[in-house]
Amino acid sequence: MDGRVRNVLFLCTGNSARSILAEALIDHWSDGRFKGYSAGSFPKGAVHPMTLDLLERLRLPTRGLRSKSWDEFAAPGAPALDLVVTVCDQAAAEACPLWPGAPVTLHWSIPDPTAVEGPDTERREAFRQLHRELESRIQALAGLPVESLDREQLQEKLAALARG
């Protein structure tokens, strides 16, 4: 094991729910092996209140979480990225900036809980479903032996993980 922390950027369009939750979960489940970041192609400018509520109920830190543009991670001085994961289909279809570090990329097609309309009970259930899906994928990602995989092997393992 090389002991190096791998930087993971989670992307979606608004950076208010899916990517924010993924950032918090990778930091929680990876035992310091990964550092999570999140951004959006068209950030909302604020984290969705139900995202913050869910994180607080899970007793996960919310300090420092904010909705931000992916341009921050393409700018000089940005952290070198090892992995970029798009968590929504719209962001995956957009032309992304050039990322420092030439990261491996991965796409997870995950429904947007902020798009669910109806009573709060239905909306909260959409956020709980988001949590279950992201947590499962992130636990699998955090369990990969990234220290012993070359770039091609890592890409293969990530593709298999994306397929389920």
Image (cartoon, helix red, strand yellow):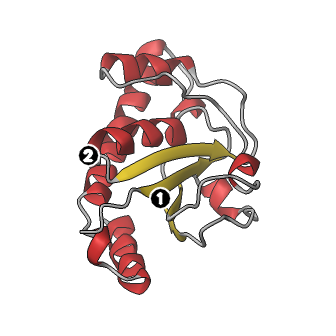
> Disc 1 marks which amino acid?
Trp
In the picture, measured across the screen, residue 82 lies left or right of residue 46, that is left
In the picture, measured across the screen, residue 74 lies left or right of residue 37, that is right
Foreground: disc 1 or disc 2: 2
User: What is the quadrant of the C terminus in the image?
Assistant: bottom left
For disc 1, the neighbor class at 10 Å (few under 14, some 14 to 19, many from 20) is some
> Disc 2 marks which amino acid?
Asp
Observer able to see residue 112: no
Q: Which residue is mark 2?
A: 31
In the picture, measured across the screen, residue 120 lies left or right of residue 32, that is right
At 76% from the left edge and 65% from the top edge, which residue is drawn? Answer: 95
Q: CA distance from mark 1 to mark 2?
A: 22 Å
For disc 2, the neighbor class at 10 Å (few under 14, some 14 to 19, many from 20) is few
Q: Indicate whether 91 appears above or below 53.
A: below
Q: Quadrant of residue 97?
A: bottom right
At 33% from the left edge and 51% from the top edge, which residue is drawn? Answer: 138
Answer whether labels 1 and 2 touch (C-beta < 8 Å): no
Residue 137 percent across, percent down from the top left: 32, 54
Residue 32 percent across, percent down from the top left: 31, 47
User: What is the quadrant of the N terminus in the image?
Assistant: bottom left
Q: Which mark is residue 108?
A: 1
At 65% from the left edge and 65% from the top edge, which residue is drawn? Answer: 100
